[in-house]
Image (spheres, helix red, strand yellow):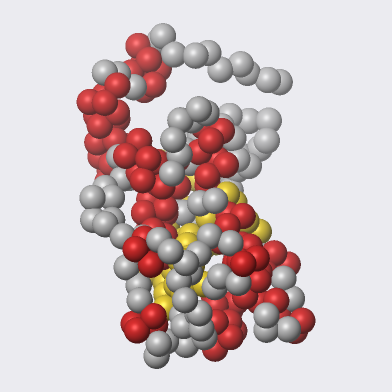
Amino acid sequence: MRHIILDTETTGLEWRKGNRVVEIGCIELVERRPTGRTFHRYLNPGREFEPGAQEVTGLTLEFLADKPRFGEVADEFLAFVDGAELVIHNAAFDMGFLEHELSLLGERYGRLRDRVTVLDSLELARQRYPGQRNSLDALCRRLGVDNSHRQLHGALLDAQLLAEAWLALTAGQGEIGFAAPERGTAAGRTVVPVAPSGPRPVLVVPEEDRALHLARVEAIRGRAGRSLWDLVESGDGPAVAATA
């Protein structure tokens, strides 16, 4: 599965008021692992920032004056994200701006949603932590992602932080017997194929992954006193119902 973690910075909060994208940052993950491929561009918006927006990003019109317009990087951007699942924190905001930018270029580009699927990590966080703050900064603090170097909003930096937070937020999904068995290896784990009616797939966990897991459990213990893994190992954890 190919994911693109995406973030944008803009001249203001609403594209309907004529605001434009000034920065795009994307990070590629394949099978939940960074590939090293990124897409990062500053853009000349051709208009002023709204009050407060410039202070959030630290960007200035002087800095952006010699940067390309969105239309000059549209083909490269679309080629980078085409066919991927985009992971965006508050996806409606970024997608609204990107769809608007494409619409200004004419019908030949179509809609971004026709090229990608979209996963909103903010909605996912709200489901996991209802009633709590789920901004990117709050999510980083809750999940143990170091965001101390985030003094200003920046599209590529925020995409990097979101990648770490999203991986932590979704850790274990599809890796403990819920996904269909696969043949070969994936993400460093050897998957032994079995018949659907047989036992669950056997996962061989590399020592480096085990060490990371133990470190994360220890961090959770430091914050909460104990972790779900402690309950499972003691036999006090929630029972899992077996189905025929």
Q: Nearer the viewer, residue 23 or 186?
A: 23
**Is residue 96 rendered to the left or right of residue 146?**
right
Quarter residue 111 falls in: bottom right
Indicate left or right for 112 with 21 as reference: right
Tally of marks: 0
Q: Residue reaching furthest right?
A: 107
Placement of the C terminus among the 4 image quadrants: top right
Query: In the image, what residue occupies the spot 47% across and 76% down?
Result: 48
Residue 88 drawn above or below residue 136: below
User: What residue appears at the point 55 percent right and 77 percent down from the top-left corner?
Assistant: 77
Q: Is residue 32 visible?
A: yes
Question: Where does residue 140 sit, x and y in percent of width and height?
Answer: 35, 43
Q: Is residue 177 left or right of residue 230?
A: right
Q: Is residue 16 above or below residue 172?
A: below
Task: Please say whether residue 188 is visible from this viewpoint.
Answer: no
User: Split into 4 quadrants, where in the image is the N terminus?
Assistant: bottom right
Residue at 26% x, 18% y is 225
Residue 38, how many percent across, how many down?
A: 42, 72
